[in-house]
Amino acid sequence: MKKIAQYLPHVARVLMGLLFVMTGSNGFFHYLPMPNDMPEGAMALSMAFVKSGYFMQLVMGTQLLVGLLLVVNRFVPLALALIAPVVVNIFAFHVFLAPAGIGMALFVAALEVYLAWSYRKVFTPMLSAKNAL
């Protein structure tokens, strides 16, 4: 059991990385089909992001960059910190606007929380109330 546990953070990191490489690159190359049955509020928010002219590209670029960093195992704590607001918004989007996709949102949120916990020693100084300077 201990052997399996030591590989879990690596498996979670690669899974999350591949997921964000796929969804991030889809934002630029559009190879995944768009759902036809999105609720009105979800569609309105998505269209607002697209019509902003920059926001959808920013989110997709962040997902792609973070996904690549996670897959190649470089700057993992930084990648987790960068993607955290995106994960929160993915989760909130599905809770409030498109509940049909809540399963995948829960999976991504669970991966993020698990990886943040796995790297908690790295995040401890960042969460300190007082500065060393």
Image (cartoon, rainbow, N blue to C red):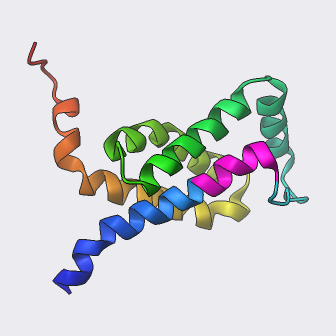
Left/right placement of residue 74 relative to residue 18 reads: left
Vertical position of residue 9 compared to residue 45: above or below: below
Residue 8 drawn above or below residue 23:
below
| Residue placed furthest toward the right | 36
Q: From the viewer's perspective, is residue 88 above or below residue 113? A: above
Identified at 72% across, 34% down, the residue is: 56
Q: Which of 40 and 82 is in front in this view?
A: 82
Task: Verify whether residue 55 appears in magenta.
Answer: no
Q: Residue at x 40, y 44 (%)?
A: 80
Tell me which segment is drawn in magenta: 21-30
In the rendered view of the protein, which quadrant contains the C terminus?
Answer: top left
Principal secondary structure, stretch drawn in magenta: helix
Q: In this view, does 122 lie to the left or right of 133?
A: right
Q: Position of residue 24 (x, y in %)?
A: 65, 47
Locate residue 84, reporting x and y percent: 45, 42
State left or right for residue 111 relative to residue 52. left
